[in-house]
Image: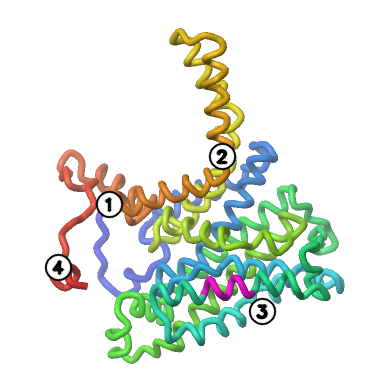
Amino acid sequence: MRFMFKTDYEDDIRLFPHSGYVVSYGVLLALLAIAPFVFSSYIVSQLVFVCIYATVGVGLMILTGFTGQASLGHAAFLAIGAYTTAYLQQFNVPFPVYFIAAGLLTGIIGALVGFPALRLQGIYLVIATISFAFIVEEILARWESVTNGNEGMRVKTIQLLGTSVPRDSPAFYFLCLGVLILTIVGTLNLLRSPTGRAFVAIRDSETAARSMGVNVSLYKVKSFAISAGITGLAGCLFAHKLSFISPEMFTLQLSIEFIIVILIGGTFSLHGAVLGAIFIVMIDPFLTYLKDDVPGMVAGVAAAFGAGADRAAHIQNNVAAFASANGLKGAIYGVIIVLFVLFEPLGLYGRWLKIKLFFQLFPLYKRATFKRQKIYVKSERNR
């Protein structure tokens, strides 16, 4: 157990509070570095999606978690970055150029979206971002001269320094991992800067932020622009990983998945964005396992408890039908969101902090450590 005594302002904004963080992150980076040479190509491919989703989660965290501005339109920003990539590739633009262009264009559009959103809050802002997502989806489907409409667009392999970087190669994995690391480090530095502290002040209280001289409108637009720009960079990598993009890939469900990333991972933690991305990426393999393997296992258990062959086959068919039902994925999302909201509003990272606190205080921990705090000040009850 380590106690930190902060004696000056530099201690409060230090990137790594103590050497233990350096060691733990160093070990994690070493494990991630050897991952493509140890695990199968399928697991490495899933890790690539984790990196891409976590990058989007970090961008959304800046807007929603740290500035307090809700958004259900980040799939549209991802689409803008992806289509910018596919369009500029047709003119043989180098990867570094269209990668940066995807982020800049998406950031500019994010700033334009932020201007009308200045007068909106809460559910009205959510509705506005959903409307923006629908508009972008229709533009992608109708602007056939640029986007090729519903037929979609092919995305060619990355050419970097005269070398091809296939989407299933270790080099592409390291590219996505590097973008995620740079995004996280850049966001940490942003949050330690006056801009980041202004974001947090706006989230906590716009009135208090204005009273301290914070230009609320300016920083809200900045937050939208930075969040959208990061998502545009992830959209470039997303397009290369899929190698084909079409408008139906960037639907409202994808935006909801991004919200789930930060909700389940932890709304106020960059670590939570990574944990939430891991959770979202693992949902599809879990559903495949549920559909292909679980019915046979359940039938085998039923047979072991004396069920006849016909009865076991009937049980297997029922379980298989349930596992293959339409909307099961959405139902799982809904149940998990409700459980987290009820029992762990701070997400997986919040639960990890409580577990760490448990071991730090053991055996002097309090039984209420793992319970949701239900004590509020009067102003919070009357909110």
Q: Give the residue number, with chain letter if any, for mark 4.
A: 377
Asked if residue 109 lies left or right of residue 222, the reply is: right
Amino acid type at circle 1 is Arg
Magenta extent: 129-135
Residue sticking out furthest to the left = 378
**264, 339: nearer the viewer:** 339
Quadrant position of the C terminus in the picture = bottom left
At x 48%, y 53%, the residue is 276
Amino acid type at circle 3 is Leu
Look at the numbered disc 4 and give the secondary structure of its residue: loop
Quarter-of-image position of residue 316? top right
Nearer the camera: disc 1 or disc 2? 2
User: Residue 322, percent across and down?
Assistant: 53, 34
194 to 169, vertically: above or below? below
Are the residues at dot 1 and dot 4 in contact (C-beta closer than 8 Å)? no
- Disc 3/disc 4 C-alpha distance (Å): 44 Å
- Disc 1/disc 4 C-alpha distance (Å): 31 Å
Q: Give the residue number, with chain letter if any, for mark 3.
A: 105
At x 78%, y 68%, the residue is 149
Q: Earlier in the sequence, mark 1 or mark 2?
A: 1
Q: Which numbered dot is residue 2? A: 1
Q: Give the residue number, with chain letter if any, for mark 2.
A: 325
